Amino acid sequence: MTRTPQPATVPASRIRSRAVRAALLFLPALFVVKVLVLTTDRGGRCFVNDFECAPFPVDAFGALLAALVVSFVVATAAPARAGRVALAAQVALEAVAVLLVLTFP
């Protein structure tokens, strides 16, 4: 008796298209969040005067971007099961990166 494999719930092509869509929306999201931060009183003072502002954690942001690139590559190149996990990781890392930009003016 042979067992027939079950079809994937989300095909790999759909996972790839969602990963590309999430990657394309990442930069506009960063831009919008940065503009929103700069419109606040504290953000405006930090931008103009650079007074009492914590430095932006460039190392943490770089690590997030590196992990984001890896998860994007895995989501677009891996089979459906690994791609699904990588897509979830990509979206979570994008959210963390946007929140990091939101917290540092």
Image: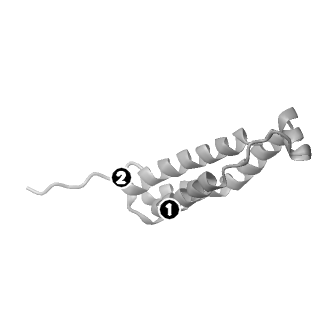
Q: Residue at x 35, y 52 (%)?
A: 8
Q: Residue at x 27, y 51 (%)?
A: 6
- On residue 10, the disc is none
Which residue lies most toward the top here? 41
Q: Is residue 79 left or right of residue 45?
A: left
Q: Tell me which label, 2 or 1, sits earlier in the chain.
A: 2
The amino acid type of the residue labelled 2 equals: Ala
Q: Nearer the viewer, residue 69 or 77?
A: 69
Residue 94 to residue 41: above or below: below
- On residue 8, the disc is 2
Which residue lies most toward the left here? 1
Q: Position of residue 76 (x, y in %)?
A: 49, 63
Q: Nearer the viewer, residue 58 or 78?
A: 58
Residue 55 visible (yes or no) = yes
Q: Position of residue 19 (x, y in %)?
A: 55, 56
Q: Residue at x 55, y 56 (%)?
A: 68
The amino acid type of the residue labelled 1 equals: Val
Q: Nearer the viewer, residue 4 or 85?
A: 85
Residue 76 to residue 33: above or below: below
Residue holding disc 1: 70
